[in-house]
Image (cartoon, rainbow, N blue to C red):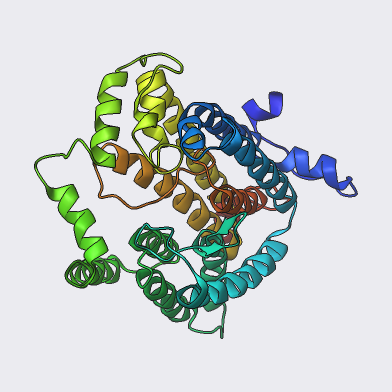
Amino acid sequence: MTEMVFGTVPARAGEPVLPRWWRTLDKWSLSCVLGLFGMGILLGLAASVPLAEKNGLPPFYYVTRQAFFGGVAMLVMMLTSMLTPAQVRRLGVLGFGVFFFALMMLPFFGTDFGKGAVRWFSFGFASFQPSEFLKPGFVILAAWLMAAGEEIGGPPGKLYSFFVAVTVVLFLATQPDFGQAALVLFSWAVMYFIAGAPVVLLTFLAGLTTLGGFVAYNSSEHFARRINGFLSAEIDPRTQIGYATNAIQEGGFFGVGVGEGTVKWSLPDAHTDFIIAVAAEEYGLILVLIIMALYATVVARSLIRLMKERDPFTRLAGAGLACAFGVQAFINMGVAVRLLPAKGMTLPFVSYGGSSVIASGIALGMLLALTRTRPQGQIGDILARRAR
């Protein structure tokens, strides 16, 4: 507990792997992630039972699967967090290559499960969404390219990373999956800004993104339908947004009581995209604020620890992973309260979904690995010595 309050201490030479890992790990972030996963299981007990009953399955079928996938995710996260930054880079670049190839194969072998967007490979007993696993790999690859570009005689890494980002976004847009495309573009913009991109250029890119959204609105019925529903002054109470909005209003500050909510019987995606509505209805605003605080703690602590890093790759990759994690949570909750148009994006570690929770475990494992305390001079100390 002392280390959680006063911070970790640098690794000691010759120290065994596990004690060194535990000593240098950000335990607050790890605790928050475990808390989010626990809340996901708790909410799954309420949200997934109606769906299981509707599909003629055992009452806790989806909860059991989520617990299994979540256990795998926690194990993967722990193992990944033990890696060095160089090993994280190799894993991320290799993973990007594998899952980008899978993304390209979606138009030929993928399925949409009746949702209007071809995002999954179906294996009968389970499904697999490549874009979930592609995100952490993309962040690592883009950070590596940008960091290489800062070296003397290095390649034009920022330009290469931009081409990679545009290519990934175009493939995601063809599914269509504009939510994941926006998240990829956002994480790249964060890293590009940290790497020293001028504000004028970022403003130009923001305008280009807006133009892309306009084109998508006029060419994609799926995208236009969601935007029209978001801009409509009236909320159709029979839509998922209508059910979610009503559930949040009914919950108030303290909720209607455990198991007393009704939205889970009406929302097809109550256990995935709109699980925060179940939390708000049964447990009230209090639990929602706790969930928001857990996400904010992970992002804030990660960024603070990364400010002390002097390795460009570590700073860029860690910032990209942390911001992507926080923004995905913000988008999911923003959709539920109608601050944003519907995106079809899960709430990391809380929503049901094997691809989502395992990919989140990989991403957070990488983030925990990059934010571990290392025996190095802090960047402020190095700059002070150079000034003298």
Residue 64, visible in the rendered structure: yes
In this rendering, would 247 be left or right of 347?
A: left
Q: Quadrant of residue 205?
A: bottom left
Q: Quadrant of residue 62?
A: top right
Q: Quadrant of residue 39?
A: top right
Who is closer to the viewer here, 284 or 145?
Answer: 284
The residue that appears at 52% across and 67% down in the rendered structure is: 138
The residue that appears at 40% across and 16% down in the rendered structure is: 260
Q: Position of residue 64 (x, y in %)?
A: 64, 36
Q: Position of residue 364 (x, y in %)?
A: 59, 48
- Residue placed furthest toward the left: 233
In this rendering, would 180 be left or right of 217?
A: right
Who is closer to the viewer here, 364 or 114?
Answer: 114
Q: Position of residue 249 (x, y in %)?
A: 25, 24
For the C terminus, which image quadrant? bottom right
In this rendering, would 124 be left or right of 206?
A: right
Who is closer to the viewer here, 233 or 48?
Answer: 48
Work out whether 336 lies above or below 182. Answer: above
Who is closer to the viewer here, 339 or 227?
Answer: 227
Residue 146, visible in the rendered structure: no
The residue that appears at 15% across and 39% down in the rendered structure is: 235
The residue that appears at 56% across and 30% down in the rendered structure is: 59
Q: Position of residue 71 (x, y in %)?
A: 69, 41
